[in-house]
Image (tube, rainbow, N blue to C red):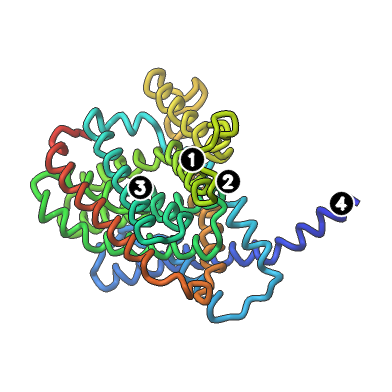
Amino acid sequence: MGKSRSSNILIDILPGLLLCIVVMFLGIYGAELIGYIMIWTGLLSEGSATPVSGIFVAILIGIIIRNVINLSDRFTKGISFSMKYVLRAGIILLGLRLSLMEALKLGAFGIPLIVACISVGLALTLYLTKKMNQSMRLGTLIASGTGICGVTAIMATSPVIKAKENEISYAVANITIFGLTGMMLYPFLGHFLFADDPIKAGLFLGTAIHDTAQVTGAALIYDQLFQNPAVIETATVTKLTRNLFIIAIIPLVSYIFFNYSRREAGEGKPEKDTLPKWYTFIPLFVIGFLILSIIRTIGDATLESTGDAFGLFAGRTWESIYNNLSSFGTTYLLGAAMAGVGLSTNFKKFKGMGLKPFYIGFMAAVAVGVVSVILVSLFGGFVRV
């Protein structure tokens, strides 16, 4: 009986899951093809990595398939499985990319600067959402994506607040459009404002652009145009440090959404004894993310102090372990999950949602950029990566 039920579940999810995997690989190779074309046309130098994210290409391919081909319902459960469980596994492995020692490189001025930019993104987006009478779920997703790490933050927040598929898709489209716009424009703005200081330019790119892949792409473009590789390291360290805040922000926005939902339902402020415990707002995958980030940090620390990570692994071995595992999570697991986002994005469901959420995302993105410019101008000179 149990085996039969397990077999039925596997049969139900397999078609959609395989489709997500296929679209994920198409996205990876599609991004590489775009990179080759950019090299061939002279936009990138020979040997440069593509500045276009495979995840972004996978989302686009998924959207095209979903809206051009009438997908059978047999794919639905597998696509949902990818967006829910494969995503969480990918986010957990993402923790291996983020060492707390990297964050310490930014020092006493760099981290507050990042916190300020995140705070502006969250606060302004939620404020505008309420003023424009938009779905607080959608606003919370856009706020998370704008403030922390783009599409990954949206997908990490969505199961916690029980977001609908059309809200997830709209938020992803929002963040992707403005993130890509920033990736193309901000390298020029960063050079115009901070041409004499690559650290300031890197801080600006790392705090003003939404997604990790977009930040990397912007830093690569900056280096290609203005021959300053120091910007790449600073932007990357800044963005990875910013990503660490997913540990705190997801429980925070979950708590905010919980209280807002109660007030909207007319339940008022919850009594102390009826308020859920604080730890119920922390998803298990965020805990897994934190644990792997701590493991990475301890490994780096022991490698630096003794020459071997945990007294077991030499430098290259340890680097190979965390790079391979985190790359599997970010490239393949998150890639399959984001392919699921594209495959579930039905433009027909956007009818009635209007353009106001895009206005919210645009104003939030601009505000984060402005705050980033101001704070980097004032305090960026104190940061040394």
The answer to which of marks 1 and 3 sits earlier in the sequence is: 3
The residue closer to the viewer here, 97 or 270, is 270
| Mark 4 and mark 3: Cα distance apart in space | 46 Å
The answer to which of marks 4 and 2 sits earlier in the sequence is: 4
Residue 89's disc is 2
Residue at (40% x, 69% y) in the render: 33
Q: Are marks 2 and 1 in contact (CB under 8 Å)?
A: no
What residue would you read off at disc 4?
3
- Residue 158, percent across and down? 52, 52
Q: Of circles 2 and 1, which is in front?
A: 1
Can residue 74 be seen here? Answer: yes
The answer to which of marks 3 and 2 sits earlier in the sequence is: 2
Name the side, left or right, on which 43 lies relative to 213.
left
| Mark 4 and mark 1: Cα distance apart in space | 39 Å
- Residue 213, percent across and down? 37, 54
Secondary structure of residue under mark 3: helix
Q: Amino acid at mark 2?
A: Ala
Secondary structure of residue under mark 2: helix
Q: Of circles 4 and 1, which is in front?
A: 1
- Residue 60, percent across and down? 46, 70
The answer to which of marks 2 and 1 sits earlier in the sequence is: 2
What residue would you read off at disc 3?
122
What residue would you read off at disc 1?
255
Q: Of circles 1 and 3, which is in front?
A: 1
Label 2: few (<14), some (14–19) or many (≥20) C-alpha neighbours in 10 Å:
some
Name the side, left or right, on which 112 lies relative to 382.
right
Q: Amino acid at mark 4?
A: Lys
The answer to which of marks 4 and 3 sits earlier in the sequence is: 4
Label 4: few (<14), some (14–19) or many (≥20) C-alpha neighbours in 10 Å:
few
Q: Are marks 3 and 2 in contact (CB under 8 Å)?
A: no
Q: Are marks 4 and 1 in contact (CB under 8 Å)?
A: no
| Quadrant in which the C terminus appears | top left
